[in-house]
Amino acid sequence: MKRLILALCLVLLVPSAALAEAPSLQCSSRSATSHELAPAGQLPQSAGEHLFFNADDLASKVDLELRFFLDGQLHLSESLPLKSLKPAAEPGDGVPPGTVVELLAMRPAERKLLATISHTEPDRVNVEIWQEGTLLRSIHFAQLQQESEALTETPFRPEMVRSQVSGKGKREQLQKLSGFPVEPATCEGGCILNRDQCYASNCSELDFCEDCEWEYQQCIDACQPPPPPPTCQYKEVYYWTGFYVVSRTPLWWDQICFHDHISSVYDSRWHVRVETTYRRDYIKKTTYGNCSTSQQVINYEYGYSWCYGWTNSACYGSLHPFNLC
């Protein structure tokens, strides 16, 4: 039986302040140089549970500040320059008007940390939404996630917004727990950097990782004599990740009767238009003198495509001889 596949790929890349020329999204395969795409099998840092926010009533009017609290302490603060966005346009290509932006779009590690904690202990993570010094809403992070999930179940096209994020974040929280300053030249500093790398590589979605903490304690206990001197050279590498799916939603009001030989009774089916939203990241990977590494999302962009996929509803008088998907 035929399944829904991607066809008739119409791509609309959202403009972005890219730091390097980005390869355009294509329907057909194409070759890419080594500096354009991430290493094979590497998962984009932003992949996972994205956090979308409905800014339809605020676009082009006001700027917002979202404050993320962990255990009652200010963890991160994000400023959204919504005045720079244009108000929602008239419906186009069957997509209803609306302005949706992504929260913590370039801070995936912190976003995943808050989401992980909120999933098991929702009272620990809260969000305040401020407008020009006035508190508009105070909600649990879990409720913000629920609203985001509801948005992804409806047709939408997220807007690029260059937000500013400040605050302690995950790395500073681990430093506070350890009681040691991060100085790569010291043994304790090297242990902390190794633990950070362990969390980033193996436990990025966990608030507490037993294996990383065990290795960290073993390292601290062995800090005499000091570790060998660094052997790596400082290096920065920039690359685009591949596109990955953010959402896929059917536009039920847009259906066409296509000829489709999938039944001995009816030879045509109603086909619904399905719109898919993609995203990719521009990554800065830094290697330090002590051989530790860090990765940072410094830009991102969206892409879109659509096709018609068959439903189970029979129809008569098909407009086309074959199913276009």
Image (cartoon, rainbow, N blue to C red):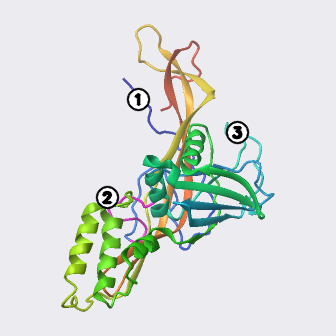
* Vertical order, 320 against 168 (above or below): above
Residue 244: image x %, image y %?
45, 52
Three-letter code for the amino acid on which mark 3 is drawn: Pro
Gap between marks 3 and 1 measured at Cα: 26 Å
Q: Mark 2 or mark 1, which has the lower sequence index?
A: 1
Residue occupying image coordinates x 22% and y 90%:
226
Q: Mark 2 = which residue?
A: 41
In the image, the segment drawn in magenta is 35-46
Gap between marks 3 and 2 measured at Cα: 36 Å
Residue 89: image x %, image y %?
76, 47
* Depth check, front residue: 149 or 221: 221
* Mark nearer the viewer, 2 or 1: 2
* Depth check, front residue: 257 or 102: 102
Q: Mark 3 = which residue?
A: 96
Badge 1: residue crowd in 10 Å (few <14, some 14–19, many ≥20): few
What is the magenta segment's predominant secondary structure?
Answer: loop
Left or right: residue 284 versus residue 63 is left
Q: Mark 1 = which residue?
A: 3
Residue 38 within the segment the image draws in magenta: yes
Badge 2: residue crowd in 10 Å (few <14, some 14–19, many ≥20): few
Residue occupying image coordinates x 46% and y 55%:
243
